[in-house]
Amino acid sequence: MTEGAQTFELTTWERMALVNVLGEICGNLITLRRAGKAMDAMELSEEERVLVHFQTVVKSSGELQHQWLDKVHVFDVELDAAAAQLVVQAAQQYAGWAVSDLALVEALMAKLGVEAT
């Protein structure tokens, strides 16, 4: 691990959720570059997609839906200190979480070190 880096143990769902959160970040160039660096780390590589049987399906409405069969796989995702801080802040401030995912979101926040308030 590089100095100042932080490693998160994340499930496939958590990684995909954070990709969605990071994709909605708006800000200055520095913020966008940090978000891009974090997103690069969060997105699944081709090998990881094969590992979890990841696929994108087109629903009858035309909407894209991501699926994976390995629901318990955990990945180590390493981020530099600035990108890790941005991920934690963005996840904590994200207002798009669904109540149906409450248990998953709470587990993710605990892994990110965010205390429930």
Image (cartoon, grey):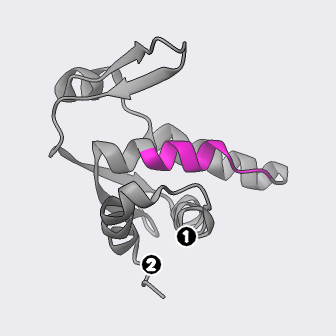
* Label drawn at residue 92: 1
Q: Which region of the structure is painted magenta?
A: 17-26
* Residue 103, image quadrant: bottom left
Q: Is residue 87 left or right of residue 54?
A: right
- Asked whether 54 falls inside the magenta stretch, the response is no
The quarter of the image holding the N terminus is bottom left
Residue 101 % position (x, y): 37, 56
The secondary element bearing badge 2 is classed as: loop
Residue 83 drawn above or below residue 59: below
Camera-side residue of 85 and 113 = 113
* Residue 86, image quadrant: bottom right
Camera-side residue of 63 and 11 = 63
Residue 53 % position (x, y): 21, 22
Q: Gap between marks 1 and 2, in whole Å?
A: 7 Å
Residue 8 % position (x, y): 33, 61
Q: Residue at x 62, y 68 (%)?
A: 93
Three-letter code, disc 1: Gln
- Asked whether 20 falls inside the magenta stretch, the response is yes
Q: Is residue 85 left or right of residue 15?
A: right
Three-letter code, disc 2: Val
Q: Residue at x 18, y 26 (%)?
A: 51
Q: Is residue 92 left or right of residue 75?
A: right
The secondary element bearing badge 1 is classed as: helix
Residue 59 drawn above or below residue 85: above
Residue 70 % position (x, y): 15, 34
Residue 83 appears in the figure: yes
Question: Which residue occupies the extreme right position in the image?
Answer: 28
Main SS of the magenta part reads helix
Where does label 2 land, which residue? 114
